[in-house]
Image (cartoon, rainbow, N blue to C red):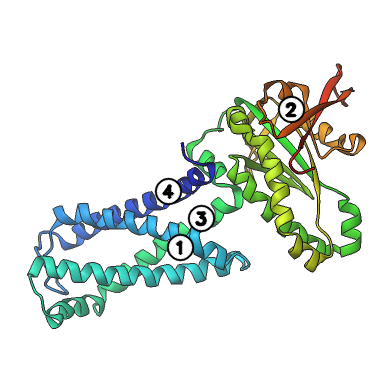
Amino acid sequence: MLLPKTSRNINRVIPFGVLWFIFSLIYVMLEKGIIGNLDHYPSTGVDYNFARNIFLVPLSGLMMGLLTRILEIGYFSKWFIKNSFTKKIIFKSLIYLVIVIVFLVIITFINTLYTDNVYSIKSLALPAWAFFTDYAVIGIMVYIASIIVITQLYAEFSQSIGVGTLSDFFLGTYHHPVEEERIFMFLDMKSSTTIAENLGHVRYFQMLRAYFFDLSVAVIDYAGSIYQYAGDEMIISWKLKDGLKNSNSIECFFAMKRALDLQAEKYNGQFGLLPGFKAGLHYGMVTAGEIGSLKKEIIFTGDVLNTSARIQGLCNHYHADLLVSEDLAKILQLPDKYEMRSVGENLLKGRIKTMKIFAISNGALT
């Protein structure tokens, strides 16, 4: 089985390959319409073979799409993370255009070598030079630049609203209301009001941005999805089977604690403190669906959200960092390193019956 992070990266890479494949296929069809019955390219005299191009060009496009997305995930997204949306699009698009031009030069040389059986540098260079100095190449570059910009816009929108959420919109997964069993974690920063007053609005926001960024890595690693940010609160969700598998929903919480501890020097140096957090978890049936006209969102409705929020609100009362409902505690299969203890029953606001609440701690960290 693939790790959640690996699976997520694959899901981020594949759409790029598909987009490049489709656009490359469209290009081959348009080229055929322009070339017509000719058996060579007018600008270079190189042999034109539609049957070959309909296979090789989309395949090359697929490879280029996968390559650019791998570079995006591995390097460029980190290099330009502090740039604005527009600057990221421009800078990364220029880099990718240069990569594509180099790729085209290599393909042109290979095509010339394969079709004309020439082996000298001069014989290889002349057709390539004729191609890249021809006016027609401007149209090709504009077409390729359009593909790059479109895929970059897709990448940024995907990053902004979430990879899974964007896919759900395209596939229409929640166009009609769907009932699902989900685990929700309401995670809230400790003493956020005091921290905001001490740091001031601007520095507090800078800390909040770094804080959410550092916590998000654990969400990816443990198969969660970020449903919403609400001030200093993060709402994380799992489909029930994903949240229970390998205790992902609980492991995620402690992985986030470790992530912040590893960044203690950064936070203390920049902000004079290391933020902490507390969380409440519950599971149950929710209804998911698209909502809105001017601004569409996929939202979840159901008692499970209110209950999760109420449980999180009890953390200070019970002096606990992590509280879960009795319903969730019954189906969790926790490793031995975790300790679960009942903190008593509580009548949560909006509920008729009391609910037993459990605190979970990691013995290795205490």
Q: What is the C-alpha distance between the residues marked 4 and 2? A: 33 Å
Residue 35: which quarter of the image? bottom left
Foreground residue among 245 and 351? 245
- Tag 4 residue: 15
Residue in the image at 45% along x and 63% along y: 149
Give the mark nearest the N terminus, 4 or 3: 4
Between label 1 and label 2, give the one nearer the viewer. Answer: 2
State if disc 1 and disc 3 touch (CB < 8 Å): no
Give the mark nearest the N terminus, 1 or 4: 4
- Tag 3 residue: 155
- Tag 1 residue: 149
Name the secondary structure under disc 2: helix
Name the secondary structure under disc 4: helix
Name the secondary structure under disc 3: helix
- Indicate the amino acid at tag 2: Val
Foreground residue among 178 and 37? 178
Percent of width and height locating residue 109: 19, 71
Residue 126: which quarter of the image? bottom left
Residue in the image at 20% along x and 53% along y: 54
Percent of width and height locating residue 140: 30, 68
